[in-house]
Amino acid sequence: MKTEQAKRGFVLDELLKRGVTTAQSGTSIMDCNYDELKYELVLASFREIDSGVDSNKWF
């Protein structure tokens, strides 16, 4: 599907911008499917949160 491939490409580009090249499983993100890439993007976005700022603390 064209749409699925476009979504995968977008998420892949976002991961590459953040410097993510390997998934948590140890495989290259180039070999991951769309759902795996979405998961990796969520993890990468959590890593970017600055926990030193009071408004970003969980509790």
Image (cartoon, rainbow, N blue to C red):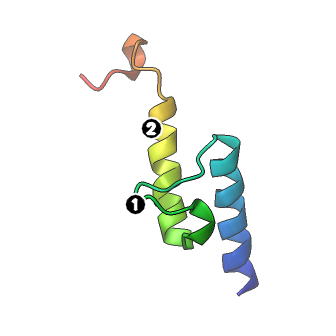
Residue at x 40%, y 60% (from the top left corner):
25
Kind of residue indicated by mark 2: Phe
Is 38 located above or below residue 8 in the figure?
above
- Residue 46 location, quadrant: top left
Give the residue pinned by disc 1: 25
Height in image: 28 above or below 17? below
Dot 1: element? loop
Residue displayed at 52% across by 60% down? 38
Question: Is 28 left or right of 57, judged from the image as shown?
Answer: right
Q: Position of residue 57 (x, y in %)?
A: 33, 21
Task: Give the residue type that dot 1 points to.
Answer: Ser
Relative placement, left or right, of 11 versus 55 is right
- Nearest the camera: 36 or 29? 29
Q: Residue furthest bottom?
A: 1
Residue at horizontal 74 percent and vertical 71 percent from the top: 6
Residue 59 in the image: x percent, y percent?
23, 22
Q: Residue furthest left?
A: 59
In which quadrant of the rendered view does residue 19 lie? top right
The local crowd at label 2, few if under 14, some if 14 to 19, many if 20 or more residues have their Cα within 10 Å, is few
Q: Where is residue 29 drawn, in percent x and y? A: 58, 61
* Between 29 and 12, the one nearer to me in the picture: 29
Q: Is residue 42 above or below residue 46?
A: below
Q: Nearer the viewer, residue 42 or 25?
A: 25
Instruction: Judge depth for marks 2 and 1 and give the one in front.
Output: 1
Specify the label residue 46 is tagged with. Answer: 2
Classify 10 Å Cα crowding around label 1: few (below 14), some (14-19), many (20 and above): few
The image's mark for residue 11 is: none
Q: Earlier in the sequence, mark 2 or mark 1?
A: 1
Q: CA distance from mark 2 to mark 1?
A: 17 Å
The total of numbered circles placed on residues is 2
